[in-house]
Amino acid sequence: MKLRRYAAGLLGLALVIGSVGCGSDGPKTLTLSASTQEFAPEPGLAVTGGAEVYADIPITDTFRQNYADFSLKLLRESRREENNATGNPENMMVSPLSAMLALEMTRSGAREETEVEMAKTLYGELSAQEGKEQLLSFLQNLPREEQAQFHFANSIWFRMGDTDFVPEEDFLMDAAGAYEAGIYGAPFDEDTVRDINNWVKYETDGMIDSILNEIPAEAVMYLINALAFEARWSEEYEKNDVRKADFFPEDGEMQTVDMMYSREGTYLADEMAVGFIKHYESEYAFLALLPKEGTDVDAYVEQLTPEKLVGLIDNAEYALVDAGLPKFKAETDLDLNEVLKSMGMLLAFDENQADFKGMGQSSRNIYISSVRQKTFVEVDETGTRAAAVTSVEPGDGAAPEPDPTEIKTVILDRPFVYGIVDTRNGLPLFLGIMDNPG
C-alpha cells in the first residue's frame, strides 16, 4: 500500500455488555487459522478468511437511491447541534461507505427487531440479504489502479480472559469471509489499545493514528472499518493556476484562500445550486455543489433528496465550466450514537432490548455502546485522497463534446457541498461540507 497522506476514513464500533460480567468458565477456545496479514498484533489470536466474491451481483437503482439516502442523512444528522458530540460541525465530512461496512458487519450478529431496524436504516426497502450483496458488490468493484489507489480493511476485536463473553464462531468466520475481516482475541488492556491504534495507523497509511484512548471495563468487542484513497487529477493544476482569492463564510470574516482555477467539462445544476465534476485519472471524480446566493448550505443539504443527488450526477450537462476550487484540508471526529438513533436505529443502542445473540453469549445483554467515525481529507494541486465511491458510467459510447460557445462559471468562494464519487455508480465514498478552507 503506497498511499500518500491525503485522505482516509475510519469508523469503529464498540459493542459492549450492559455491565461487567466475569464468568468462572472463561472464554471458549477457538480453532482458527493464523493471520496472513502484514500486521498481526500480539498477544491474542488472529484469523483472516478467503474473501467471498460478490462482484458479479448487479447494483440496482433501488440500492443507489438507498445508499444516497443513507449518505445524506448521515451528513445532515451529524451537522445538527443536538447530535454533534464535538460541538463543532464546521468543515464536516462523513464516509457513508465506511459507516455502512462497519454497521453491516454488526448487523450480521443482530437478531429479531434489532436486525430489522438496522437493515431498514442501511438499505430501506431492500431485504437485508439484497442490501448486503449489493454493498459488497459495490465495494469489490471499486477501481484499484496505480493512478487511483483504494484500500479498505475490516477487523473485529473481542475480549479474552476475565469475562464470560463467548463470541459465536459462525459470526467471526462470516466476518472473515464476507468482509475480509481480521479477527483478534485480546485481553483488552493497554497493550490492546496500542494494538488497535497500530492497526488503524497501518491500514490508513498513518493518516489516522488512533481510534481509542482507552477501553472501558464493560467493552467486549470492537468492529472497525478503515478506508484509504489517493488519486491524481486527470489534469493537474499548474503553478499559475493557483492564486489568492477571497472566501466568504456564512458566519465570520472573509478569508484569503489559495484558489485553484481550471476549465472543466461537466456542469451540475438544480433550482438551488450549481456545480461541477472534476475527474481523476481513474473512474473517480470530485463533485462540488455551490448553493446559490442567499441559500444557506445546511438549508440546501436539508432539501437535497437522494433522487436529486443521484439525478444531478446521472443528468450532468457536458458543458465548459470555468471552475474555482480552494485548496483545503479537513479532519472530522464524530460520535454517531445520536445520529444513528435519529436515522431509525434505536434498539441496537438499548442496553436492555438490543438483541445481538448472533454475535456471542454473555450473562449480560449485548448492545452497541459507541459508534465513532474519524475522517481526513486534503485537496491540492495534484489530487485528492479520501475514501472510496463506485460509479457506473451510464450509456454506451463516448460522451458528447461540450459546446464551446457557452461557458459556465462556478467559483467555490463560499460554503459548498463536496463528495468523492465513483463515476460508474454515481455514489459518494465521502460526502462533506466545506464551511471555511482558510
Image (spheres, rainbow, N blue to C red):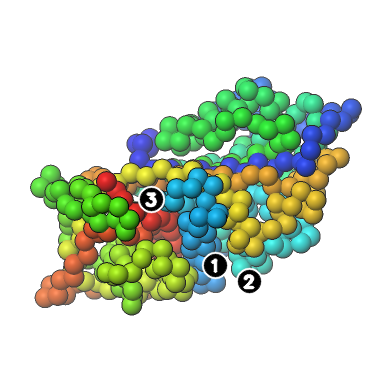
Q: Which marked residue is nearer to the observer: mark 1 or mark 3?
A: 3
Image quadrant occupied by the N terminus = top left
Residue 190 picture quarter = top right
State whether residue 421 is above or below residue 168.
Answer: below
Relative image position of residue 224 (x, y in whole percent): 59, 41
Q: Residue at x 80, y 51 (%)?
A: 352
Please tell me which residue lies in front, 261 or 291. Answer: 291
C-alpha span from label 1 to label 3: 25 Å
Q: Which residue is mark 2?
A: 125
Q: Identify residue type, mark 3.
A: Asn
Along the horizontal axis of the image, is 35 left or right of 416? Answer: right
Label 1–label 2 contact, CB within 8 A: yes
Q: Mark 3 or mark 2: name the one nearer the start of the chain.
A: 3
Quarter where residue 183 is shown: top right
Q: Is residue 372 above or below residue 72?
A: above
Q: Which residue is mark 1?
A: 66
Q: Secondary structure at mark 3?
A: loop
Q: For the image shown, how many numbered marks are present on the structure?
A: 3
Q: Which residue is mark 3?
A: 91
Disc 3 to disc 2, how far (Cα)? Answer: 32 Å
**Amino acid of disc 2:** Glu
